[in-house]
Amino acid sequence: MAERILVTGGTGVLGRAVVRELVAAGRSVRVLSRRPPPGDARYVSGDLTTGAGLDDAVADTDVVVHLATATSGRAREVALARLLIAAMERAGVPHVGYVSIVGVDQVPLGYYQGKLAVERLLERSAPAHTILRATQFHDLVRTLLAAAATLPVPLVPDVPIQPVDVRDVAGRIAELALGDPAGRVPDFGGPQVRGARDLARAYLAATGRRKPVLPLRLPGKVIAAYRAGDHLAPRHPGGSITFERYLAEHPAPRRLSYRTAQP
């Protein structure tokens, strides 16, 4: 049974929720950070960009939950994972959990291609792995809609979306981290597949605004993949928190920023 768990990206939107779940389960949890807060024993020093401190960080660990991500492209995403995996192999850490995105093998985005490359890297590595692909987070969808809502007439892509709450995803990640390595597990999606215009209307209503919402028809292979639903998991609606509930519980739904996990 996994008792000692290291989380990378533990200060991000998803990472904080995962840490809460694991602590609530009574596990010993450490969070990897380049600059640990002074005096906080839960944080351990380590740099995924250089490898500095990783050997000490992963020592005496039962499982590493790798949530840190690089939005700058495929190469850096793979580089972060490669240094972490190498440290795990030297320390003999038996299990690594990785969170990917539904559609990484279908949607031709550079960020997605990085996620897919890490999946392939894990499949060839010594530590046993568990890979969970999730659909887009409520937080990300809200941020995109908040930006669109600044226009007199919001324009949103004419695509379906299946947003999921990070709390739901965190619960599933914690469950997987506490279990045996399972390879790639079934995808995890939000409770509803909805059109982007429908979600935009819900966002405007939740923030007390009335505006028409127009569809934006964009060209290109990426949008074509989204329009085809390659980023959806309609047969795996694992989440239960709807977009409306998420908005009602959010302290500042008009905020434009979206804080992501950093290595």
Image (cartoon, grey):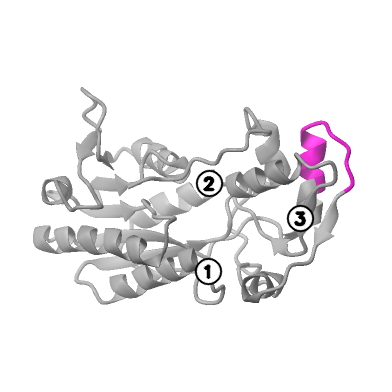
**Is residue 93 in view from this perspective?**
no
Label 1 packing within 10 angstroms: few (<14), some (14-19), many (20+): some
Instruction: Residue under label 1, please give it.
Output: 109
Is 215 situated above or below 121?
above
Left or right: where does residue 112 sit relative to residue 252?
left
Q: Nearer the viewer, residue 59 or 144?
A: 144
Instruction: Residue under label 2, please give it.
Output: 166
Q: Position of residue 128 (x, y in %)?
A: 25, 68
Q: Residue at x 15, y 48 (%)?
A: 52
Distance of label 2 from label 1 (alpha carbons): 22 Å
Q: Nearer the viewer, residue 178 or 160?
A: 160
Instruction: Residue under label 3, please give it.
Output: 156
Magenta stretch: residue 207 in it?
yes
Distance of label 1 from label 3 (alpha carbons): 19 Å
* Element marked by disc 3: strand
Q: Residue at x 78, y 66 (%)?
A: 217
